[in-house]
Image (cartoon, rainbow, N blue to C red):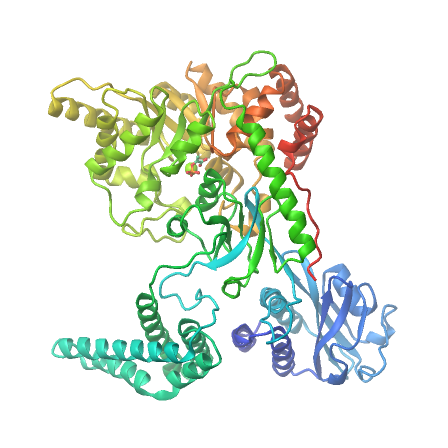
């Protein structure tokens, strides 16, 4: 594509991105594309899924009176052809095509050449973008490439605008009739019905929830007080630094102060507050608009001003937020929604009020989803099209089985979900009775079920569900919830609590596993490719002081209890393992010397999380006491699928034959060295994969406390020989879907249907 087309494309996308609602998005698109390509017509036909028709939705060049008035069946006309074949159609003489459909009135008859490209978002055809011209000619390759690129870039924006339109604010006095369902991925099973609270990131202009203010005059006064305070602050700083600042740096302060003094910004915000918007929302929206305006300017100097407006905007927003921090009034049934939920955001909501989570980013294996599962909070991740800032205060349903979020549900739908919710509670009660029964198959095979912990609350939940040990204590969780590294003594206390609560049962403490998607605010790691970067043992070997303090704290906490097992994350080579072992031995020797009495050397294990570890399992097993498979990371690295990325969530497959082969190899190799092997990834907590790993010979399964009773129930219901037969058959299957279907069918036949399939099948509630 030519350079000027690329530039045009960039500015079209930018401009369209700024439009607030769907019709403006469409109108802007057709106008800009028509002008850039110099064609006579550009139109968009959008698919209306409930009617399955293409609606003539926007045009430049045809008769606008017909916009949103006429439509054609999904497979009708050239537009239908483009949509059905999901590829461009480029014709010199459109009328001669057998599929050409004449639509009287729109004025198409004059135009001979036709180029239509599909608009596709997440594999779904949203509509068709068409350009037409009188002159009889084929559009050239460059033009076709341009239109395809525009369409690909606009698809997400159109989908987002459609979603936002679906929850547009009410007109005063009218009853809300718009309803919507948003798709994401299932993060933690269960149903939650409640009210949305938006988790905003401090000073982030894009995550401030839409909210109304109760008292306009008070809000206006508050806004102006804050503006004045920021102005004052800036003057003070500028004054103090005056002698040390270069003139151009001083000029920056002047620019900011002028922007604050100039009444333009403030009066726009005042106007919005008078309409009932709260100050934070109004300020962010107005600032975002100005940033866009500057960004769209050709002039490089003016373009630069966008970053000044942004910086100033964030400062004032931060001030408004800090000045506004009263205790947040969380609804009784809070559903926390946010762009990218983090563990610390969960911590801010009183646990008894938090009933559900929805995150626009992230996936089933993101750490926040893992935490949610351990806390038993129904969660939807990766709801990419959800206009989350507009949800504040709305009633929503989280369907953590199917990964759906319902906005403003009908009373009937609400009732259906309520029934399921009640049933679930009853069902969970039934499972509670398994607590003191052993996990043993019908033919007498005993399989210890352990738990994964991290939060303090996990201790009680785990013991209540009959955990026989802790297979993975994620030590980074207490680190994540703090503002600095905990000291050795602080760590000792935290670890002692875990060890004491479970003693004499074993507690497997993993050394700090940060990096990847777990970054500590006080130790930020910024990398282009964090999952392939500095994470897990790589960080702690580079910082032996952190590692040694942690290991010492663990060993001190273990004094007199002797139920500690240490687990090393992300080991990918023998030298790495040897280095880590050396440090452990050194810490032990030093401690013994320091304390003056003998301390037991804890059992040490290695996590098998990277493909290299699968192939060196024997070498590792020889050097340590046990191996534990971290199937979450192992799956992501084997399949090259980011565990956090909603776009590829469907490719993250625990039943993938390659994953299963790897697990079998690790079990065999570890046993060949006469060492036990366990599994502590999420696969241990899924009844169907749990049965497979039991058949492979895994000695311990470690999972979230939430999943433990389900897995126990399934295993108590089958025999080991049956599980082994299933395993034998699955190794002949060639795709994840085949394995999953086969296993689920087997378990359903064995009488565990309610544990394999969610209690609800997909409720296909219509969006409208
Ligand atoms: C794993 O990778 O499977 C694992 C248990 O560790 P985490 O999920 O904490 O990365
Ligand atoms: Mg891991």
Q: Residue furthest top?
A: 444
Q: Position of residue 717 (x, y in %)?
A: 62, 20
Q: Position of residue 107 (x, y in %)?
A: 80, 84
Nearest the eye: 220 or 596: 220
Q: Position of residue 685 (x, y in %)?
A: 52, 32
- Relative side of 58 to 252, left or right: right
Vertically, is 190 above or below 724? below
Considering the image in quadrants, where does the C terminus appear?
bottom right
Looking at the image, which residue is at 22% across and 81% down?
Answer: 248
Q: How many marks?
A: 0
Looking at the image, which residue is at 58% across and 65% down?
Answer: 160
Considering the image in quadrants, where does the N terminus appear?
bottom right
Nearest the eye: 125 or 496: 496
Nearest the eye: 411 or 157: 411
Nearest the eye: 333 or 37: 333
Vertically, is 575 above or below 649? above
Answer with the quarter of the image where residue 230 lies.
bottom left
Answer with the quarter of the image where residue 455 lies.
top left
Q: Position of residue 203 (x, y in %)?
A: 36, 66
- Relative side of 70 to 17, left or right: right
Looking at the image, which residue is at 58% across and 25% down?
Answer: 713
Res. 571 visible in picture = no
- Relative side of 250 to 155, left or right: left
Figure quadrant, ligand 1: top left
Res. 683 visible in picture = yes
């Amino acid at each position: 594509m030519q350079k000027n087309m690329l530039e045009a494309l960039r500015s079209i996308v930018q401009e369209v991105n700024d439009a607030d609602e769907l019709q403006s998005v469409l109108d802007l698109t057709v106008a800009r594309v028509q002008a850039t390509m110099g064609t006579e017509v550009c139109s968009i036909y959008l698919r209306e899924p409930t009617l399955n028709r293409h609606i003539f939705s926007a045009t430049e060049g045809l008769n606008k009176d017909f916009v949103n008035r006429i439509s054609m069946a999904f497979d009708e006309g050239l537009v239908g052809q483009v949509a059905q074949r999901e590829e461009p159609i480029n014709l010199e003489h459109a009328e001669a095509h057998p599929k050409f459909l004449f639509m009287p009135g729109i004025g198409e008859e004059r135009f001979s050449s036709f180029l239509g490209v599909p608009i596709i978002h997440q594999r779904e055809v949203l509509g068709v973008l068409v350009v037409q011209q009188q002159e009889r000619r084929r559009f050239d390759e460059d033009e076709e490439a341009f239109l395809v690129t525009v369409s690909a870039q606009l698809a997400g924006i159109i989908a987002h605008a459609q979603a936002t339109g679906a929850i547009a604010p009410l007109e005063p006095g009218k009853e809300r009739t718009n309803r919507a369902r948003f798709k994401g991925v299932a993060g933690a099973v269960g149903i939650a019905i409640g009210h949305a609270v938006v988790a905003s990131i401090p000073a982030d202009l894009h995550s401030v929830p839409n909210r109304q203010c109760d008292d306009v005059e008070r809000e206006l006064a508050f806004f102006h007080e804050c503006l004045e305070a920021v102005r004052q602050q800036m003057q003070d700083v500028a004054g103090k630094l005056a002698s040390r600042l270069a003139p151009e740096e001083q000029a920056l302060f002047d620019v900011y102060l002028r922007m604050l003094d100039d009444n333009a910004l403030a009066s726009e915000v005042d106007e919005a507050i008078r309409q009932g918007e709260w100050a934070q929302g109004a300020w962010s929206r107005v600032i975002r608009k100005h940033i866009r305006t500057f960004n769209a300017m050709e002039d490089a100097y003016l373009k630069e001003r966008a970053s000044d407006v942004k910086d100033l905007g964030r400062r004032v927003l931060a001030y408004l937020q800090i000045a506004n921090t009263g205790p947040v009034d969380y609804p009784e049934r809070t559903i926390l929604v946010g762009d990218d939920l983090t563990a610390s955001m969960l911590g801010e909501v009183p646990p008894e009020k938090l009933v559900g989570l929805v995150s626009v980013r992230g996936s089933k294996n993101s750490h926040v989803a893992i935490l949610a599962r351990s806390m038993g909070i129904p969660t939807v991740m990766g709801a990419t099209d959800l206009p989350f800032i507009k949800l504040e205060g709305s009633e929503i349903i989280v369907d953590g089985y199917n990964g759906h979020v319902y906005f403003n549900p009908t009373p009937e739908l609400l009732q259906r979900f309520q029934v399921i919710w009640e049933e679930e509670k009853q069902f969970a009660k039934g499972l509670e009775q398994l607590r003191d029964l052993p996990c043993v198959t019908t033919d007498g095979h005993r399989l210890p079920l352990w738990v994964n912990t991290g939060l303090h609350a996990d201790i009680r939940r785990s013991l209540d569900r009959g955990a026989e040990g802790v297979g993975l204590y994620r030590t980074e969780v207490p680190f994540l919830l703090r503002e600095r590294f905990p000291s050795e003594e602080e760590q000792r206390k935290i670890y002692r609590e875990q060890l004491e609560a479970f003693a004499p049962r074993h507690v497997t403490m993993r050394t700090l596993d940060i990096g990847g998607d777990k970054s500590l605010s006080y130790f930020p790691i910024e990398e282009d490719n964090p999952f392939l970067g500095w994470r897990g043992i790589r960080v702690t070997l580079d910082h032996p002081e952190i590692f040694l303090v942690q290991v010492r704290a663990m060993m001190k906490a273990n004094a007199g209890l002797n139920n500690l097992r240490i687990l090393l994350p992300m080991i990918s080579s023998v030298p790495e393992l040897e280095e880590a072992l050396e440090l452990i031995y050194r810490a032990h020797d030093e401690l013994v010397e320091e304390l003056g009495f003998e301390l037991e050397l804890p059992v040490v294990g290695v996590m098998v999380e990277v493909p290299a570890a699968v192939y060196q399992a024997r070498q590792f097993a020889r050097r340590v006491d046990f191996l534990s498979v971290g199937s979450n990371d192992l799956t992501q690295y084997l399949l090259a699928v980011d565990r956090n990325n909603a776009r590829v969530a469907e490719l993250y497959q625990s039943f993938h034959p390659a994953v299963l082969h790897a697990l079998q190899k690790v079990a065999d190799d570890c046993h060949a060295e006469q060492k036990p092997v366990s599994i502590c990834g999420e696969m241990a907590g899924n009844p169907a994969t749990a049965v497979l790993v039991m058949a492979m010979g895994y000695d311990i399964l470690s999972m979230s406390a939430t999943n433990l009773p389900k897995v126990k129930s399934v295993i108590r219901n089958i025999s080991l020989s049956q599980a082994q037969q299933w395993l034998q058959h699955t190794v002949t299957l060639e795709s994840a879907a085949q394995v999953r279907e086969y296993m689920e069918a087997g378990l359903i036949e064995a009488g565990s249907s309610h544990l394999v399939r969610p209690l609800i099948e997909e409720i296909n509630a219509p969006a409208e």
